Image (cartoon, helix red, strand yellow):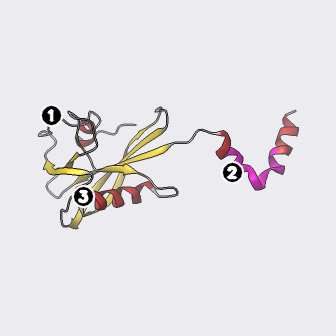
Amino acid sequence: MSRFLARLWRALRPVQSRLVWLLNPKFVVGVTGVVRDAEGRVLLLRHRMWPPGRQWGLPSGFAHQGEDFRRTVVREVREETGLDVEPGRLVMLNSGFRTRLEVAYEARLLGGELRLDPFEILEARWCRPEELPEEIQPVCGPLVRGETVC
């Protein structure tokens, strides 16, 4: 039986990736940037769409289809703040959610002029790790402190 299945799978080579795609669950990937400046402060944003009491967090958004997640960090930070960053090491990979995967990278501020996207962002603040606002998303604390969350 296993030989038959192996032969069948090889015969389906032209459509294997489509079959795998059809038979597996679909996910969106949320990508976060832990953006630090030269003084070691972290960029925090107060997000308009996030629930009251937890609106402060890190720059984040969803990856586009086929987009490298490091590129997502660069794009999302630029879209939300107008700042340019260079992504660094992977610091978070969370799965187990129903339809979502979460990824976070360290990112170094390169420059740019702070211009907030008023549709998504209410306010921006550079914070030292020990000076985080009370209304911050719970996952942000460990990331800001430099802990890997995988």
Q: At which x and y percent is residue 148?
A: 34, 39
Quadrant of the snapshot with the N terminus? top right
Q: Residue furthest left?
A: 131
- Secondary structure beneath disc 3? loop
- Dot 1 amino acid type: Glu
Q: At which x and y percent is residue 118?
A: 22, 56
Give the mark toward the camera: 1 or 3: 3
Q: Earlier in the sequence, mark 2 or mark 1?
A: 2
Q: Number of callouts in the render?
A: 3
Residue 121's disc is none
- Alpha-carbon span between mark 3 and mark 2: 38 Å
Q: At which x and y percent is residue 19?
A: 71, 46
Q: Is residue 113 magenta?
A: no
Q: Residue furthest bottom?
A: 112
- Where are the magenta residues, as a range? 9-20
Which residue is under mark 1? 134
- Secondary structure beneath disc 2? helix
Which residue is under mark 3? 117
Q: Is residue 13 magenta?
A: yes
Which residue is under mark 2? 17
Q: At which x and y percent is residue 8?
A: 84, 44
- Dot 2 amino acid type: Ser
- Residue at 17 percent across and 52 percent down: it is 124
- Residue at 34 percent across and 55 percent down: it is 88
- Dot 3 amino acid type: Asp
Q: In the image, 131: left or right of 116?
A: left
